[in-house]
Amino acid sequence: GSLLRQPLNRPSHPGYIVFMLVTLFFCLFCLLFQQYPGMNQLSSSLGGLSLQSSPQPESLRPVDLTQERNILPTTPVWAPVPNLNVDLKKLNCSPDSFRCTLTNIPQTQALLNKAKLPLGLLLHPFRDLTQLPVITSNTIVRCRSCRTYINPFVSFIDQRRWKCNLCYRVNDVPEEFMYNPLTRSYGEPHKRPEVQNSTVEFIASSDYMLRPPQPAVYLFVLDVSHNAVEAGYLTILCQSLLENLDKLPGDSRTRIGFMTFDSTIHFYNLQEGLSQPQMLIVSDIDDVFLPTPDSLLVNLYESKELIKDLLNALPSMFTNTRETHSALGPALQAAFKLMSPTGGRVSVFQTQLPSLGAGLLQSREDPNQRSSTKVVQHLGPATDFYKKLALDCSGQQTAVDLFLLSSQYSDLASLACVSKYSAGCIYYYPSFHYTHNPSQAEKLQKDLKRYLTRKIGFEAVMRIRCTKGLSMHTFHGNFFVRSTDLLSLANINPDAGFAVQLSIEENLTDTSLVCFQTALLYTSSKGERRIRVHTLCLPVVSSLADVYAGVDVQAAICLLANMAVDRSISSSLSDARDALVNAVVDSLSAYGSTVSNLQHSALVAPSSLKLFPLYVLALLKQKAFRTGTSTRLDDRVYAMCQIKCQPLVHLMKMIHPNLYRIDRLTDEGAIHVNDRVVPQPPLQKLSAEKLTREGAFLMDCGSVFYIWIGKSCDNNFIEDVLGYPNFASIPQKMTYLPELDTLSSERARSFITWLRDNRPLSPVLHVVKDESPAKTEFFQHLIEDRTEAAFSYYEFLLHIQQQICK
């Protein structure tokens, strides 16, 4: 069945069609003579026919998909702007923080079911913001009934009373709120910053604390088995830590600690006053204990010299090791004991399958099944050890971040649970080796710089509230659901995305607007308790046409991707794939039934949904869901982890990369960013027919960039941008653009730097020569073309059409 799981019914009865045609002619007749008093009521009951005299919105223009060959716009697809009055539009939350799959909310669940579209929210609640109103007032004004924070969409009945926009209760305005600190005036509560901004941050009082705010605590747990030492990640990690020690978020109370492990666990006493770090070994991994509980997590500033000594020594301490085993489970148990008194962040670096003690794992991958079109097994965990440990950590406000740097299968499906349920993050570097795979080494180095210095919130909880009548039922992301609507986040970081599915429990007939509010309560790295609040307001509609007019197709595809990951694990991959196809079939079929005089052979979508089939095809070809193309199990599982926790803007590039031609960049239409001129080349569709041998193309896949150089590419471009005299002299493995003093080089680098900015994972760059073996990876992303195992875009449309006509 479809991911939306409702049976499909299509009004194709001949009598129905005759009735519709008669009604249509009658309405047109009335419109011509303007004599019919109930015109508006009639048009709303036939909502699908949009008979109001207002012109049809562009989003409802019917598009014949099989006829329109260039469906992809040449400029980026922006989030649709909700159809609100001018004042509300100005006040609404930025789609970068908060967006809904439908910007017009259906009045009833029945109407939503008819539209066959997913309803849900996508959130990026802690993203880096340049402007954020911070409010320090003694009274945080909230609804007495549902605890909603006062926001721009409440109504003031008079100066002394306000009405909640979620539960409609009337509340008193507290005395302190009558004074506006910004204008220093009294008696204008509606002009306070909380009511003028839909994203605000409150400094919280002691009412919002269960205990005094914790300090920032960082523990690094490092695999030092033979495999790990051979891969050489320690050098990069220690170097990165030495460079960024002073930039770790925190204050004078910040604490830090280190553990290493192979078949035993090694602790490091870094107590101030020692002449050098002291290594303490615990070899009983079946009953882990802390040798000196008080001196293993130390104050960063008091013990800074000892910490630096340890970081300088670590890379060479284990060079001659013969230890091949990995006691990851026991090391994590020890980390949990060490962190429990305070909470904080554990960063685990692992390079292989855990082979000793609690949580040990066996290899479950059959390499011969990597291209299978049948059943893909082992997408779920082999043991509940890592999930249980994560829940224990979450209970003690500790998140575990996993860095997996593996050269062979490491059962990420099991290991990922330790981060998933503790609100941690997962980083994955397949085939990592610091000399044999320099681009992965460079990626680790850049990712670590962002990871170690980005903002962090500790001991956090997040709650999402919505207007009475709406309810939330499934959450997506890395967290633990503590109660029906409270997400427990031991850590929150600015790169974490979340999604939630919604249903309409009670009809929304008495309201023209609904609101959603997310509140994130956290402790900043400086030890302040803060609450970040985002509020989104959307109109309610009663006609099917209006529901289609307001679809946010990118939000819808990201929500469906999350749902499909769940379906792959709980049911099967093939079930999830079928459900994705059915989502397109059902929604286009339902839309088709609202369009009059539709030719039976046409496949028509409203303009708002014209990219839906393309994006679903892209998902089916994505590593998470593809079949018939060789895909390592850990790669597939990692792609699924990414889908569940990437914010929409990054997830979209993973699903549908952006392709640009870059051998002819000009300043026409360029934008100016910090004294740089950034060219804005048009987007190209993802098809080999767009690649000309005379050109050079850049593909942005989110965490990787490819530059494809055509065989007959102009030598001037090759020399000015790549620094080689001609095509033949470009090396096979080139992973950077040199800084050359030419206009073409400056334009290309400026464009790539602009693309690179503001993303959680530093993209690696691969220069791919036409006809080199490396090009298969690049060509796999050309999703409009057919492969041995998958449809081309045109074939996919025909397949959808056949399913609809069945």
Image (cartoon, rainbow, N blue to C red):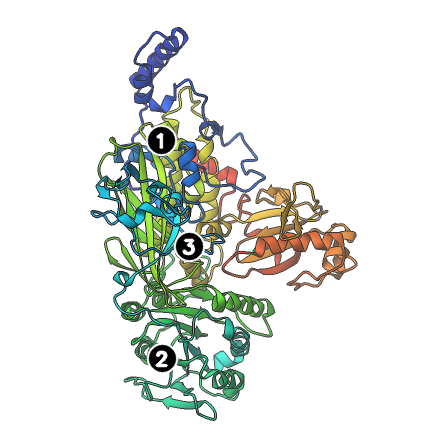
Residue 300 can be seen, yes or no: yes
Q: Residue at x 58, y 53 (%)?
A: 755
Residue 68: x and y in percent read 54, 31
* Residue bearing the label numbered 1: 590
* Residue bearing the label numbered 2: 331
**Alpha carbon of mark 1 to alpha carbon of mark 2: how far?**
54 Å
Q: Residue at x 35, y 73 (%)?
A: 361
Q: Secondary structure at mark 1?
A: helix
- N-terminal of the two: label 1 or label 2? 2
Q: Residue at x 54, y 61 (%)?
A: 762
The C terminus lies in which quarter of the figure? top left
- N-terminal of the two: label 2 or label 3? 2
* Residue bearing the label numbered 3: 643
Residue 501: x and y in percent read 31, 47
Labels 2 & 3 near each other (Cβ < 8 A): no
| Crowdedness near tag 1: few (<14), some (14–19) or many (≥20) residues, C-alpha within 10 Å | many
The disc labelled 3 sits on which kind of residue?
Ile
